[in-house]
Amino acid sequence: MMRDSVRYLPVLQGAVHRESIWGVKAVPARRDGDDARPIVMRKSGGGRVMSLLGSKIDNIGDALRVAEEHLRDAV
């Protein structure tokens, strides 16, 4: 987790893990057996509004790709 975080926020290089905070994650029922949390894309407002949800920090590249694909298809 620390290595992944440093890729996006280099200032965390010297961070020290002290404890973990546990939380609940929402996953589709079909993905309940693994850690996959896919990007969810929804359009509304006649296709003019896009909602994009990705629940891992390293999803940002995938999220941009999904958004670009949807925008390209809309043109």
Image (tube, rainbow, N blue to C red):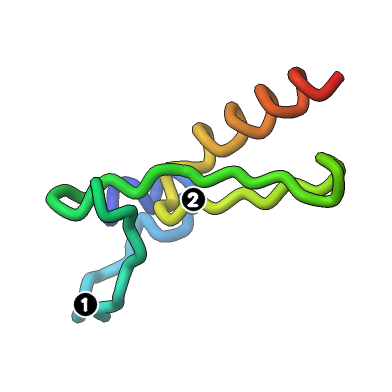
Q: Amino acid at mark 2?
A: Gly
Residue at x-position 34% and y-position 47%: 4
Q: Amino acid at mark 1?
A: Ser
Q: Nearer the viewer, residue 59 or 75?
A: 75
What secondary structure is marked by label 1? loop
Q: Can you give x and y, in whole percent of width and height, for residue 50 in the image?
A: 73, 46
**How many residues crowd around disc 2 within 10 Å: few (fewer than 14), some, or many (20 or more)?**
some
Between marks 1 and 2 in the image, the one whose residue lies nearer the viewer: 2
Q: In the rendered view, does 46 fall on the left or right side of 24?
A: right
Per the rendering, the mark at residue 54 is 2
Give the image quarter of residue 43. Answer: top right
Q: Can you give x and y, in whole percent of width and height, for residue 57 in the image?
A: 44, 51
Q: In the rendered view, does 12 fall on the left or right side of 42?
A: left
Q: Can you give x and y, in whole percent of width and height, for residue 71 in the image?
A: 76, 27
Q: Nearer the viewer, residue 34 or 57?
A: 34
> Disc 1 and disc 2: Cα gap in Å?
21 Å
Give the image quarter of residue 68. Answer: top right
**How many residues crowd around disc 1 within 10 Å: few (fewer than 14), some, or many (20 or more)?**
few
Q: Dividing the image into 4 quarters, which one contains the N terminus?
A: bottom left
Q: Dividing the image into 4 quarters, which one contains the C terminus?
A: top right
User: Is the Cβ of the residue at disc 1 closer than 8 Å to that at disc 2?
Assistant: no
Relative vertical location of residue 41 with respect to residue 28 in this rendering, above or below: above
Location of mark 1 (residue): 20
